[in-house]
Image (spheres, helix red, strand yellow):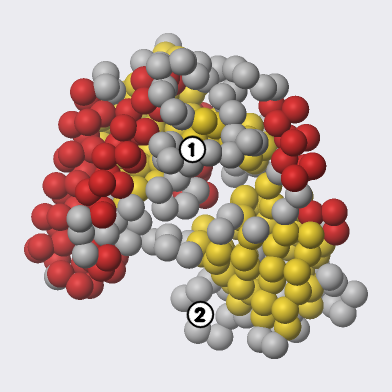
């Protein structure tokens, strides 16, 4: 029988570059020390480390509040550690958190919450914590922590979308549209995001276009009637859709061959095949092939 628990996925951004810079032996030692420190910190917050996955850690916690408490403590402490390191050796952490029923077999864990936490970890950026809202108990003891609604996000292989929040853990940050979940209804928070508005800037070759939230949805595609045209045979006639949803800008892939998203400062790419993700900060979108293809058409984006 499954047990209701909270799953945490973490991994390190930039570890590939550290291996290239230091070599296998020294880089392995640095990564192992960091994942061991994360594991010990999780244990001190009542978590159980299920396994380490190269530069990642999978852990489970009895409650959502203890899980969020742990990852906030981790990010705040790690931020201070990063400030003392050479930029070339810095490995920021990203985190996905999900609550649900989990089955444990031979010490490993399986279930919807594991899949959702893993996917949120894939989608979020460096230094970020993304959580799904299902049965999450945000207690008052999470001092200085706020939650920004990103809205419903589809997770591959899952029929129902997840309502996702980004944890704002930086103690110096403040924003009038960041709030504890218990203080403001998510629908009201989404309306606030819609009222504030936002925009995305797209660039490809000599083409530059800015789209404001009230101008969305907009389409990227090969045909000249697209809102943003990328003339390449690998790009579908209508390749991707950009939406303004619940105060966030979403990229929705509707193509034949897929899209890949690379966020500035992130160590891995996010593949999308009839899938979607939240766009944040700056980055690039590869259309019709992965970034491994040096000739792939790339659209640069910037969110503000």
> Percent position (x, y) of residue 178?
59, 34
> Percent position (x, y) of residue 250?
69, 52
> Percent position (x, y) of residue 300?
61, 73
Foreground of the two, 76 or 176: 176
The image quadrant of residue 267 is: bottom left
In-image side of 297 versus 104 (left or right): right
Which labelled disc corresponds to residue 293?
2
Furthest-right residue in this view: 225
Which labelled disc corresponds to residue 245?
none
Q: Taking 64 as reference, is 215 above or below it?
A: below
Q: Taking 165 as reference, is 254 above or below it?
A: below
Q: Residues within 10 Å of mark 2 (few under 14, many from 20)?
A: few
Foreground of the two, 280 or 146: 146
Which labelled disc corresponds to residue 168?
1
Residue 37 appears in the picture as rendered? yes
Residue 52 appears in the picture as rendered? no
Q: Residue at x 59, y 29 (%)?
A: 179
Q: Residue at x 32, y 39 (%)?
A: 76
- Mark 1 vs mark 2: in front: 1
Q: Residue at x 69, y 52 (%)?
A: 249
Q: Taking 10 as reference, is 205 above or below it?
A: below
Q: Taking 47 as reference, is 191 above or below it?
A: below
The kind of secondary structure element at disc 2 is: loop
In-image side of 196 versus 142 (left or right): right
Q: What is the distance, in whole Å, between disc 1 and disc 2 at their CAs?
A: 35 Å
The kind of secondary structure element at disc 1 is: strand
Q: Quadrant of the N terminus?
A: top left
The image quadrant of residue 10 is: top left
């Amino acid at each position: 029988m499954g047990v209701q628990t909270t799953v945490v996925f973490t991994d390190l951004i930039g570890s590939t570059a550290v291996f290239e810079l230091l070599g296998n032996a020294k880089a392995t030692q640095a990564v192992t020390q960091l994942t061991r420190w994360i594991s010990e910190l999780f244990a001190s917050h009542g978590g159980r480390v299920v396994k380490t996955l190269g530069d990642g850690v999978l852990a489970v916690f009895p409650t959502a509040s203890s899980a969020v408490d742990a990852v906030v403590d981790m990010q705040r402490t790690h931020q201070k550690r990063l400030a003392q390191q050479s930029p070339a050796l810095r490995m920021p952490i990203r985190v996905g958190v999900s609550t649900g029923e989990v089955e444990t077999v031979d010490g490993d864990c399986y279930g919807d919450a594991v899949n959702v936490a893993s996917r949120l970890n894939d989608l979020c950026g460096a230094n970020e914590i993304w959580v799904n809202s299902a049965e999450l108990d945000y207690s008052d003891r999470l001092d200085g922590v706020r939650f920004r609604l990103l809205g419903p996000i589809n997770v591959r292989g899952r029929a129902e979308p997840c309502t996702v929040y980004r944890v704002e853990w930086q103690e110096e940050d403040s924003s009038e549209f960041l709030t504890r979940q218990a203080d403001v209804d998510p629908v009201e928070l989404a309306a606030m995001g819609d009222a504030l508005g936002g925009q995305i800037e797209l660039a490809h070759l000599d083409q530059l276009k800015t789209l404001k939230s009230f101008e969305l949805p907009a389409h990227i595609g090969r045909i000249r009637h697209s809102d943003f045209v990328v003339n390449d045979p690998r790009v579908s006639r209508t390749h991707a859709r950009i939406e303004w949803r619940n105060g966030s800008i979403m990229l929705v892939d509707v193509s034949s061959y897929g899209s890949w998203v690379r966020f500035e400062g992130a160590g891995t790419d996010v593949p999308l095949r009839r899938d979607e993700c939240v766009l944040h900060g700056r980055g690039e979108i590869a259309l019709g092939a992965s970034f491994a293809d040096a000739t792939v058409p790339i659209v640069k984006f910037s969110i503000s």
